[in-house]
């Protein structure tokens, strides 16, 4: 990101605060911080402290992109983390809750615990200090930032319950008439480091093979095509993660939709099939009846074509005889008498989470 004009909040300028005379900053769960424009004193959990109002300590506004920028060192210290800055390499090393994160100014490539990842926004270097966006905080540390214009207050909220993090590693290429953009999820924070390495290796190998197959093509289509695959996380807790890959592959024969899911039981360290979830053997018939389908039971392909959605419940999908994709959802309430005991946690974690 190139910042042509940055306005320090203390100057009371920018799209977010305009003529504001007071800004409060709160860090929920780990700390609560408030400070006022023009004052050297601020409070942390009710304890008064003093700081110099410089670009090193104050949040800033990128007026060009209309983004809030946060001073990395100051924020991480409030979250009980630490930052080491290498001014020669323009690199910051962050230590936070067992993670070592290396980021470089003006670069979207980063490193987390030895894994290469891709940031949504590049860190910004301004007058010797590094700043990050609220999206960076959300993606890297499970936080969200809320602006209350009536109270002139910024809230930085972190989750009390720690979940494994999932970071994107983007593979992309554009050359000649072929191009691809593929997001590969990287799981960080699993209890078993060996399992963490194995599962990341498995996912990465699978996605890389898909890219290589696309690039090799066939004699009929050696130089034309586009592949784009992204992923979402409809469910993520300390017990289970559902990942949905979706995208499109285009070549001389036309376009094909891609949809694949991976459901990981972090308790048993295995990929989950639909059968693993249900107590009774006739669950396929029960689900077909629940959805009032013409079929007596679901097609066998749904064993791996399903995912958990924190708002919708269980979702299964497949293609019918006409090649059209069908998708059905069963709420957590409807699932409560069908799940095995070791998946009952889904029923108490089905409240919609605040979107980041």
Image: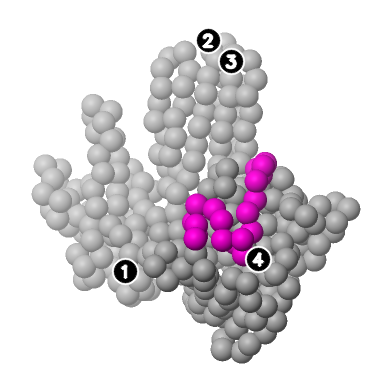
Query: Dot 4, crowdedness within 10 Å: few (<14), some or many (≥20)?
Result: many
Q: Earlier in the sequence, mark 2 or mark 1?
A: 2
The residue to which callout 1 is attached is: 351
Q: Is residue 22 magenta?
A: no
Of badges 4 and 1, nearer the viewer stands 4
Q: Nearer the viewer, residue 19 or 247?
A: 19
The residue to which callout 3 is attached is: 177
Q: CA distance from mark 4 to mark 3?
A: 47 Å
Please tell me whether mark 2 sits on a helix, a strand or a loop: loop
| Mark number displayed over residue 58 | 4
* Residue drawn where x is 47% and y is 26% of the image: 249
Please tell me whether mark 3 sits on a helix, a strand or a loop: strand
The residue to which callout 2 is attached is: 220
Please tell me whether mark 1 sits on a helix, a strand or a loop: loop
Q: Where residue 199 sits in the image (x, y, percent)?
A: 59, 55
Q: CA distance from mark 1 to mark 3?
A: 46 Å
Q: Where residue 212 sits in the image (x, y, percent)?
A: 62, 29
**Which stretch is magenta?**
1-19
Q: Earlier in the sequence, mark 4 or mark 3?
A: 4
């Amino acid at each position: 990101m190139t910042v042509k004009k940055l306005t320090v909040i203390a100057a009371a300028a920018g799209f977010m605060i305009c003529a504001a005379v007071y800004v409060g900053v709160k860090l929920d769960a780990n700390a609560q911080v408030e400070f006022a424009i023009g004052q050297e004193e601020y409070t942390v959990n009710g304890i008064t402290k003093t700081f110099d109002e410089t670009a090193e300590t104050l949040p800033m506004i990128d007026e060009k992109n209309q983004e809030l920028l946060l001073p990395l060192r100051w924020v991480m210290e409030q979250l009980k983390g630490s930052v080491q800055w290498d001014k020669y390499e323009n690199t910051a090393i962050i230590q936070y809750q067992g993670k070592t994160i290396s980021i470089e100014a003006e670069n979207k490539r980063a490193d987390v615990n030895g894994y290469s990842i891709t940031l949504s926004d590049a860190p910004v270097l301004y007058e010797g200090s590094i700043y990050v966006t609220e999206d960076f905080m959300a993606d890297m540390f499970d936080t969200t930032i809320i602006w209350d214009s009536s109270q002139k207050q910024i809230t930085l909220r972190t989750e009390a319950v720690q979940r494994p993090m999932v970071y994107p590693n983007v593979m992309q290429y554009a050359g000649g008439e072929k191009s691809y953009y593929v997001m590969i999820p990287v799981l960080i924070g699993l209890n078993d480091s060996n399992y963490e390495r194995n599962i990341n290796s498995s996912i990465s190998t699978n996605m890389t093979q898909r890219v290589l197959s696309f690039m090799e093509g066939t004699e009929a289509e050696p130089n034309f095509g586009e592949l784009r695959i992204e992923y979402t996380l409809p469910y993520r807790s300390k017990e289970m993660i559902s990942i949905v890959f979706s995208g499109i592959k285009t070549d001389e024969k036309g376009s094909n939709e891609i949809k694949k899911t991976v459901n990981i039981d972090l308790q048993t360290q295995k990929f989950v099939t639909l059968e693993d979830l249900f107590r009774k053997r006739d669950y396929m018939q029960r689900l077909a009846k629940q959805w009032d389908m013409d079929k007596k039971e679901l097609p066998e392909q749904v064993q791996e074509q399903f995912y958990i959605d924190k708002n919708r419940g269980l979702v299964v999908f497949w293609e019918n005889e006409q090649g059209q994709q069908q998708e059905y959802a069963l709420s957590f309430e409807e699932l409560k008498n069908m799940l095995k005991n070791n998946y009952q946690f889904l029923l108490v974690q089905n409240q919609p989470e605040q979107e980041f």
